[in-house]
Amino acid sequence: MSTRIYIPCDSAALAVGADAVAAAVAREAALRGLDVAIVRNGTRGLLWLETLLEVETPDGRIGFGPVEASDVPALFDAGFGAGHPLALGLVERIPYLARQQRLTFARIGITDPLSLNDYEAHGGYRGLRKALLLAPSEIVASVTASGLRGRGGAAFPTGIKWNTVLKAPGIEKYIVCNADEGDSGTFADRIVMESDPYVLIEGMTIAGIAVGASRGYIYVRSEYPHAIAQLEAAIGRARQHGYLGRNLLCSGRSFELEVRKGAGAYICGEETALLESLEGKRGIVRAKPPLPALAGLFGKPTVINNVLSLATVPIILDKGAGYYQDYGMGRSRGTLPVQLAGNIKHGGLIELAFGVTLREILYDYGGGSASGRPIKAVQVGGPLGAYLPESQWDTPLDYEAFAALWAVLGHGGIVVHDDSADMAQLARYAMAFCAVESCGKCTPCRIGSTRGVEVIDKIRAGTQPAQQVVLLRDLCDTMLYGSLCAMGGMTPYPVLSALNHFPEDFGQPGVGQQAA
């Protein structure tokens, strides 16, 4: 009987030599005459341990990591035993993983991403089978009752969006998945697409049945070649087995799906710019109304959801709205995939119910800073998210709680900075990023970001800093309320939060100095 050894095939593992590890395992097994079956699974999300090698045993999968190709002979010499220095014990019991609530990511790291048998054996396509027995309005009602909200940043209730498209007149409708994951510190969409592509395919198929759409598009950022390859392979296999195409599972319903490569612009993560790009045009923000739900792709009613939103739909249809609704707090129901990056000891992906605090994430999961220095600021929600000081780290991860702080949860990306960070420099980066990535359609974003860089440069140079700070706040106010979309409208968040909470980095008196 062969021994099954699991080695991840996602981008993060490949970047640190997973292919070389797999080749070394195959070579060593052949030299020793051992029967070994290598399974290329998805990542568990414990990225600081990649390459994470797992060996199947009667008691469960034993982990070793981080493994390099040069470590493989010694692993065989030790019989992959617990005494090896890289041994981690049973993977499911590693505290980082064991304390999570994995719903959307339930299969990820466990299965072969392209195996339909694996997917079905772990609950895959049960949601679609149940959806095919329901009326479209019943599917929409279930998603609405679950409390699922958009995981792309805006947090708009998914069921309300679907209901608008369902009721919109028109024979032709579309499902569009926004997989243009461009926020700093975010990689959850990539992990889903590379490690469990069928869950996204199933979620989009259910969405199509729910609103009467027969075609969908996955708009993937061009920098994700491995995700694109996995999706295209999975779509082909799903079609071969009746999960896509005409007459889905002999139900008489149809849904087709294809992948479109992004145009390489951050602004195309904004839903209307994405639609423009999908139609073959330059990615420029559209004015609203009309809403995409009424006049979206090619002018037709269109559902646009993030990868994580659509990938969560199958479990809601399978286990029921109440099951999902039982997780979370307030109006933030279910779980949020949190991505830990930056100056953090244990970077990776964590899926937790809403309500956990930043402090718990930073220390109970992240293990503190990688540098060993005190953590100074945490940016949540991508490059346009606010910087949170330690006084705000006990705030629960909840959309409304963060909004009360003038902060955003966004896509769940968390980037950590220690006490050596220059917050004025980081604020400048936010303005410079906006200047580069702006589509240029509206003046507050296009010109405001350029002026913002100039003003912050003057502050850092000590040129009339008090007057320049007043000007910077006025400029942020104009961008916040005058920009056409969130690109310019949210750029003030990191700038003002840095200025408000870390004034000393801008040459301004701190709270203690002001009191004196």
Image: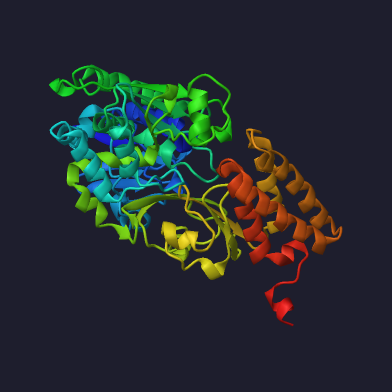
Classify 415 as above or below 263.
Answer: below
Residue 129: which quarter of the image?
top left
Q: Is residue 105 visible?
A: no
**Left or right relative to 95: residue 372:** right
Percent x, y for residue 152? Answer: 44, 43
- Residue for point 37% across, 26% down: 231
Query: Image quadrant for the C terminus?
Result: bottom right
**Left or right relative to 284: residue 163:** left
Percent x, y for residue 450? Answer: 74, 42
Query: Image quadrant for the N terminus?
Result: top left
Q: Is residue 115 visible?
A: yes
Q: Nearer the viewer, residue 405 or 34?
A: 405
**Left or right relative to 451: residue 372:** left
Classify 198 as above or below 415.
Answer: above
Q: Residue furthest bottom?
A: 516
Q: How is the image coloured?
A: rainbow
Classify 49 as above or below 506.
Answer: above
- Residue for point 24% across, 29% down: 209
Q: Nearer the viewer, residue 500 or 488?
A: 488
Percent x, y for residue 471? Answer: 76, 56
Percent x, y for residue 378? Answer: 56, 58
